């Protein structure tokens, strides 16, 4: 049974799934994103929590204030909200380290929290940050060539008119650092021993179309053994297919307990 853990003086709460068997001293904290609350898209977080609990990890999932229909609460910023959640889970379970993250804006929050709190030693990024640049243009060109030649003129015109680093709506929904700052943060995290699992799906084609964009995003850290990347363009952003969700859960489960 999941346990309810009160946050922010009872104004909010999260659900704790305790580890089964011998706990590993680590907890996973999953954030909500967009209009999807703590259960995750198609109950992804619920099924993931049960899998990870079987593997000896505690899992806490809660709604970030002001995300979707979650109330504002009293915290001055998102980092203080997450810090209270980590404190509460640590007090309840004895966990000494944390994996944080989730999908879309939850991945962005996980990254920021990993930078801010040294208790975080793992970051789960589902469709997180990716720079565009020339490889995105190449991806757009490949898409155009795969379609009917009758559509090429209009697609080419839109391609030429578009700004290379300003995907429609991207800055309105994501909170990414500048690329140089992101690389500096990546170096800090990896030097600290933080492990990173970054998934990219085909559901974010408005900013990611080519795997070389991922190489450009992480720069010289792309080959660091503590950074693991999966580019699965056949999957959609919210993992509509049950088989896709199972595949992602399997991959996360293997990564989360790896030495």
Image (cartoon, rainbow, N blue to C red):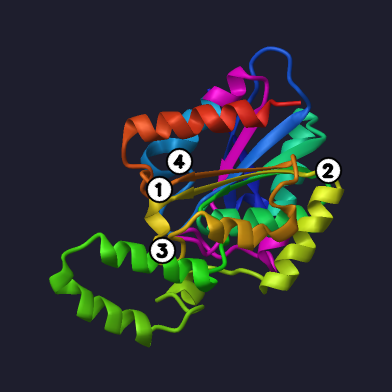
Q: Residue 105, position in %: x, y?
A: 53, 59
Task: For label 1, count other residues whose C-alpha is less than 10 Å away and answer few (under 14), some (14-19) or many (20+).
Answer: some
Q: CA distance from mark 4 to mark 3?
A: 33 Å
| Pair 1/2: label in front | 1
Label 2: which residue? 193
For image coordinates 50% across by 66% down, the residue present is 135
Image: 23 above or below 9: above
Return the residue nearer the eye: 97 or 152. Answer: 152
Quarter-wise, where is residue 81 in the image?
bottom right
Q: In terms of sequence position, does the residue under pointer 4 or pointer 1 come before the other?
A: 4
The kind of secondary structure element at disc 3 is: helix
Q: CA distance from mark 2 to mark 3?
A: 33 Å
Q: Is residue 71 magenta?
A: yes
Label 3: which residue? 139
The kind of secondary structure element at disc 4 is: loop
Label 4: which residue? 39
Q: Residue 243, position in %: x, y?
A: 35, 30
């Amino acid at each position: 049974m999941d346990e309810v853990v009160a946050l922010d003086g009872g104004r909010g709460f999260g659900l704790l799934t305790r580890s089964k068997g011998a706990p590993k001293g680590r907890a996973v904290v999953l954030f909500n994103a967009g209009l999807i609350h703590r259960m995750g898209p198609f109950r992804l977080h619920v099924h993931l929590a049960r899998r990870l609990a079987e593997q000896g990890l505690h899992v806490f999932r809660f709604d970030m204030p002001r995300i979707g229909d979650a109330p504002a609460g009293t915290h001055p910023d998102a980092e203080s909200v997450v810090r209270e959640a980590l404190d509460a889970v640590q007090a309840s379970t004895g966990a000494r380290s944390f994996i944080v993250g989730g999908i879309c804006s939850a991945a962005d929050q996980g990254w920021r929290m990993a930078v801010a709190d040294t208790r975080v030693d793992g970051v789960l990024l589902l469709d997180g940050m990716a720079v565009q640049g020339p490889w995105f243009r190449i991806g757009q060109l490949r898409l155009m060539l795969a379609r009917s030649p009758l559509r090429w003129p209009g697609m080419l015109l839109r391609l030429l008119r578009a700004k290379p680093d300003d995907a429609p709506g991207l800055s309105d929904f994501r909170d990414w650092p500048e690329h140089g700052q992101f690389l500096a943060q990546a170096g800090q995290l990896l030097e600290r021993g933080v492990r990173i699992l970054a998934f990219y799906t085909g559901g974010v084609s408005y900013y990611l179309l080519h795997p070389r964009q991922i190489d450009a995003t992480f720069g010289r850290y792309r080959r660091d053994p503590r950074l693991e990347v999966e580019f699965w363009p056949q999957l959609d952003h919210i993992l509509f297919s049950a088989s896709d969700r199972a595949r992602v859960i399997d991959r996360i489960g293997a990564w989360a307990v790896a030495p």
